Image: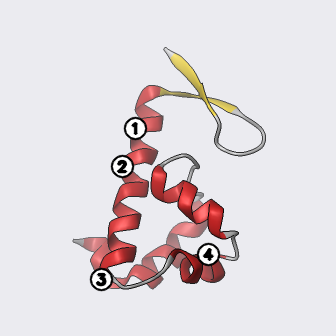
Amino acid sequence: MRQVFALGCPTVSIRQDEHNFFVALGSRIAQLRKDSLITPVQLAETLGAPQPTVSAYDDGQRRVTESMLPTLTRMLGQAWRN
């Protein structure tokens, strides 16, 4: 079953398991960011994204793009691998 979730413009249809994945990923990013004492504003500046976008990543309301993963990994350092 596919559900529609607002993930920014345009709205796309994703499966529930895909939505669950991005919620879990966002939660992990948020925890690593907090553990690294990185603010949402700092992460947003590094990613070149608005701060509300980073908050939407943290909450799993937006997909983290594959192109952002190397920057996230560098910024969050070793904690990403644990």
Task: Tell me the distance, in whole angstroms, between the alpha carbons under discs 3 and 1.
Answer: 24 Å
Which residue corresponds to mark 1? Answer: 20
Disc 3 and disc 4 in contact, CB within 8 angstroms = no
Relative side of 36 to 68, left or right: left
Residue 75 spot, x, y in % from top left: 46, 83
Closer to the eye: label 3 or 2: 2
Q: Earlier in the sequence, mark 4 or mark 2?
A: 2
Give the residue at x 65% y 36%: 6
In the image shown, does 35 or 21 lie closer to the viewer?
A: 35
C-alpha span from label 4 to label 1: 23 Å
Residue at x-position 33% and y-position 67%? 31
> At label 4, which amino acid type do we have?
Ala
Between label 4 and label 1, give the one nearer the viewer. 4
Q: Which mark is residue 24?
A: 2
Q: CA distance from mark 4 to mark 2?
A: 19 Å
In front of the other: 81 or 33: 33
Residue at 40% x, 43% y: name it. Answer: 21
Which mark, residue 44?
4
Q: Say what secondary structure mark 2 lies in.
A: helix
* Residue occupied by mark 3: 78
Residue in the image at 47% along x and 36% along y: 19
**Dot 4: within a 10 Å radius of its alpha carbon, few (fewer than 14), some, or many (20 or more) residues?**
some
The mark lying in front, picked from 3 and 4, is 4
Residue type at numbered disc 3: Gln
Badge 3 marks a residue whose secondary structure is helix
Which quarter of the figure has residue 50? bottom right
Instruction: Bin the neighbour count of mark 2 within 10 Å (Cα to Cα): few under 14, some 14-19, many 20 and up.
Output: some
The numbered mark, 3 or 2, whose residue comes first in the sequence reads 2
Image quadrant assignment for residue 51: bottom right
Q: Are marks 2 and 1 in contact (CB under 8 Å)?
A: yes
On the rendered image, what quadrant is the C terminus found in?
Answer: bottom left
